[in-house]
């Protein structure tokens, strides 16, 4: 089990390479078989890593056997391995969905998807900030190309905005890393947490500047106001299967905030303790409000879902600012729920658009849907979950977050905003359902046969809504254990800096 920690990175990297070489590079059937097989292997490896993390041991993998803080290390605690498992499951669902024909819309869909999986998994597992930057760039380059899959004018315009903003973000990231390395002499997260408490004088101010610049970068990746304007246009322009995979990408930004500002700028950081909270709390509330207004104003179903992603980001960031183990556990449960449900809605939007003809997913009357029972049932299930109606997963996450805000004594602002937001989202989703399934411009449906692969992927993701509720007790126990590890900075630092592990 020594090399298990690096396998979630190596397997998708190998998959991407294999998919570019013969026979997979030239033959569609071979490419699909290889992609599906390697996605299953990635999920299996992620499951093994997650199961190992449940023992409570923080796995540290020193590449080349160069120990931290001098070498590159990968760190797999419960939170990291749980998110790797979530990403691998979502990637498998997207691969299955793409086999219905979406992978034919452009070149290199499958290798790009696996390279994106490589970047996301690496971001979750890395133990130092420079390699976080590297994995950010890997996932961003793959996402640029995936966004242009089956390109048209709308996708090109959205892609240009997306690329420019992320290039600016990458530049700021490098500046922040340069400042922090110049002061601390390290970019290993655990070592930074150890050294930051010893700073004094101008060094404190410099590290604060570097830390706030990092916050700008992570807020951009997570789509926190005022850096969220790229997301609705980007996600609504992408193919539904690509947008579904993108549902995990904003969570990389949220994860980075949790990891860096709980570890490096935690309670041991002296004057720099929780430097993010002052900025994140009002930004989170405004993000929820703007996301909700976006949901109400959206003219297409995918635009509605994209703005729901913004609402979920605001909710997660608000939970992070509560700064408690209870709130972090609630945030992790909500993160799993929101990622899967919004991904399911994107997949559903693709199937609905196919059966509405040229109108697509625009919220205007169109021909009736040929499979109203199947798609309508999935719509109701996913919508009830996303608005937090009992007994589905959204209700569990909502109640838990409301309780966490009470404990943090921030409920005066959070409760009314979050509850009103949920009500307005319910109204908007009801309007969307009425337009998509009830209001018709003619009586004749368009006969578009849905692929069994696409239906299977949709049902697989939609089934997570009741399953997350059914096993809420087990999942909440795991997220609370993950939260306990996150807030125990000394144990994390000792595992990374004090434990020698054999590397490759």
Image (cartoon, helix red, strand yellow):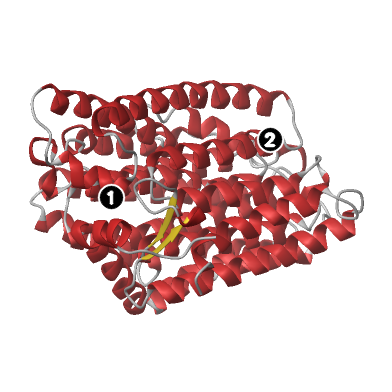
Residue 289 percent coordinates (x, y): 30, 36
User: Are dots 1 and 2 in contact, CB under 8 Å?
Assistant: no
Residue 54 drawn above or below residue 87: below
Q: Secondary structure at mark 2?
A: helix
Residue at horizontal 65 percent and vertical 47 percent from the top: 115
Residue nearest the viewer, comparing 119 with 402? 119
Q: Quadrant of residue 277?
A: top left
Per the image, the residue denoted by label 1 is 190
Residue 115 drawn above or below residue 393: above
Indicate the quadrant containing the C terminus: top left, top right, bottom left or bottom right.
bottom right
Q: Does 344 sit left or right of 16 as displayed?
A: left
Residue nearest the viewer, comparing 127 with 345? 127
Give the label, 1 or 2, closer to the camera.
1
Asked whether the viewer can see residue 379, the reply is no
Residue 280 percent coordinates (x, y): 23, 36
What is the number of the mark on residue 145? 2
Residue at horizontal 57 percent and vertical 56 percent from the top: 9
Residue nearest the viewer, comparing 438 with 254? 254
Residue at horizontal 73 percent and vertical 37 percent from the top: 149
Q: Does 42 sit left or right of 75 as displayed?
A: right
* Mark 1: few/some/many CA within 10 Å (<14, 14-19, 20+): many
Residue 32 percent coordinates (x, y): 81, 59
Residue 98 drawn above or below residue 479: above
Q: Does 231 sit left or right of 269 as displayed?
A: right
* Mark 2: few/some/many CA within 10 Å (<14, 14-19, 20+): some
């Amino acid at each position: 089990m020594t090399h298990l920690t690096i396998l979630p990175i190596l397997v998708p990297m190998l998959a991407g390479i294999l998919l570019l070489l013969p026979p997979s590079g030239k033959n569609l059937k071979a490419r699909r078989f290889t992609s599906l097989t390697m996605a299953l292997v990635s999920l299996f490896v992620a499951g093994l890593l997650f199961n190992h993390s449940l023992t409570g041991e923080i796995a540290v993998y020193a590449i080349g056997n160069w120990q931290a803080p001098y070498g590159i290390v990968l760190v797999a605690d419960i939170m990291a391995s749980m998110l790797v498992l979530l990403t691998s499951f979502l990637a498998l669902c997207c691969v299955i969905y793409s086999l219905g024909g979406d992978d034919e819309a452009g070149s290199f869909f499958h290798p790009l998807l696996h390279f994106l999986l490589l970047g996301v998994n690496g971001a979750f597992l890395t133990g130092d900030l420079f390699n976080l930057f590297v994995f950010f760039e890997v996932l961003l380059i793959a996402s640029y190309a995936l966004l242009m899959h089956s390109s048209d004018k709308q996708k090109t315009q959205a892609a240009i905005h997306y690329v420019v903003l992320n290039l600016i973000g990458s530049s700021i990231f490098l500046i922040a890393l340069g400042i922090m390395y110049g002061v601390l002499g390290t970019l290993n997260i655990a070592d930074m947490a150890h050294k930051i408490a010893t700073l004094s004088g101008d060094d404190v101010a410099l590290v604060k500047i570097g830390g706030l610049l990092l916050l700008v970068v992570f807020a951009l990746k997570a789509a926190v106001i005022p850096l969220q304007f790229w997301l609705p246009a980007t996600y609504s322009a992408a193919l539904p299967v690509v947008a579904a995979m993108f549902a995990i990408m904003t969570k990389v930004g949220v994860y980075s905030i949790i990891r860096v500002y709980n570890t490096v700028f935690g309670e041991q950081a002296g004057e720099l303790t929780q430097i993010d909270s002052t900025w994140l709390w009002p930004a989170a509330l405004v993000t929820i409000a703007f996301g909700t207004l976006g949901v109400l104003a959206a003219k297409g179903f995918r635009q509605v879902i994209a703005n729901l992603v913004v609402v979920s980001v605001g909710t997660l960031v608000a939970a992070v600012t509560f700064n408690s183990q209870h709130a972090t556990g609630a945030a992790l449960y909500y993160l799993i729920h929101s990622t899967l449900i919004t991904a399911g809605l994107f997949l559903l939007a693709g199937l609905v658009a196919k059966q509405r003809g040229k109108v697509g997913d625009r919220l205007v009357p169109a021909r009736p849907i040929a499979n109203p029972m199947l798609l309508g049932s999935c719509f109701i299930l996913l919508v009830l979950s996303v608005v937090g109606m009992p007994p589905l997963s959204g209700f569990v996450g909502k109640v838990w977050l409301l309780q966490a805000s009470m404990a943090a004594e921030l409920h005066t602002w959070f409760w009314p905003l979050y509850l009103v937001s949920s009500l307005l989202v319910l109204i908007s989703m009801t309007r969307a359902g009425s337009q998509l399934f009830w209001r018709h411009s003619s009586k004749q449906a368009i006969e578009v046969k849905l692929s069994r692969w696409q239906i299977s992927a949709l049902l697989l993701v939609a089934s997570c809504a009741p399953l997350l509720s059914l096993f809420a007790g087990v999942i909440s126990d795991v997220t609370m254990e993950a939260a306990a590890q996150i807030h125990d900075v000394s144990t994390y630092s000792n595992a990374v800096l004090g434990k020698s592990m054999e590397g490759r």
